[in-house]
Image (cartoon, rainbow, N blue to C red):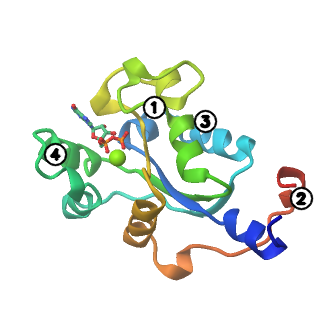
Amino acid sequence: TLSNSKVAERNKERSLIMIKPNGVQRGLVGEVIKRFEQKGFKLVAMKFTQASEEHMKTHYKDLEKLKFYPGLCKYMSSNPVVPMVWEGLGVVKTGRVMLGETDPAKSLPGTIRGDFSVHIGRNLVHGSDSVESAKKEIALWFKDDEVVTYTAGNNEWIYE
Ligand code: IDP
Ligand code: MG
């Protein structure tokens, strides 16, 4: 069995989850936050901000060769977004499950994209796709001291 500190370590995985401009405009900020809260993940950082196009180009750098990249970066910087850092066991993978597929048409009901979106270019939310990219994205959106360390009171009711 794992030591207590190893268990605590596993529970500290982090993902950047971001509500896109249409999620803000459609009043779905609370809905997205609610789902991650209810699941049992821990909010450790959040801001309400309008990013520059340059910032979005950096965020989506991996996609720069794709034809939708310029439009995507323009759209993502056109209105406010809500980037957040959520923490917990397997939050990167499970967070992606909660979001649904990239294409809302392939996303099951019960997922955020499946429940609230129709078009791939307006799929409401971003979620990191690996622990490595989560680290990069979190560093891009938040200064070290904007990610808050605290003890969640419900911890022992979520983890064995
Ligand atoms: P992801 O957000 O599920 O990780 P990525 O492949 O990383 O998907 O693409 C980033 C974003 O670019 C998607 O969330 C989506 O909004 C947009 N996108 C991806 N593929 C297409 C496309 O074929 N047409 C238009 N927009 C796309
Ligand atoms: Mg992606």
Upstream in sequence: badge 4 or badge 2: 4
Residue at image location 18% in from the left, 47% down from the top: 74
- The quadrant in which residue 118 appears is top left
Spatial CA distance of label 4 from label 2 is 43 Å
Spatial CA distance of label 1 from label 3 is 11 Å
Residue matched to label 1: 26
Give the label on residue 31, or none.
3
Q: In the picture provided, is 105 more to the left or to the right than 109?
A: left
Spatial CA distance of label 3 from label 4 is 27 Å
Residue type indicated by callout 2: Glu
Upstream in sequence: badge 2 or badge 3: 3
Q: Residue furthest front?
A: 1
Spatial CA distance of label 2 from label 1 is 35 Å
Asked if the residue at tag 2 contacts the one at tag 4, i.e. Cβ–Cβ closer than 8 Å, the answer is no
Residue matched to label 4: 69
Residue matched to label 2: 156
Please state the horizontal and vertical placement of residue 57, each as a whole percent of the image: 20, 58
Mark whose residue sits in front, 2 or 3: 2
For the residue pair 65 and 112, the one nearer the viewer reads as 65
Residue at image location 15% in from the left, 39% down from the top: 68
Residue type indicated by callout 4: Tyr
Q: Secondary structure at mark 3?
A: helix
Disc 1 crowd rating (10 Å Cα; few below 14, some 14-19, many 20+) is few
Mark whose residue sits in front, 1 or 3: 3
Mark whose residue sits in front, 3 or 4: 4
Residue 51 vertical placement versus 80 (above, below): below
Asked if the residue at tag 4 contacts the one at tag 3, i.e. Cβ–Cβ closer than 8 Å, the answer is no
Upstream in sequence: badge 1 or badge 3: 1
Residue 87 vertical placement versus 76 (above, below): below
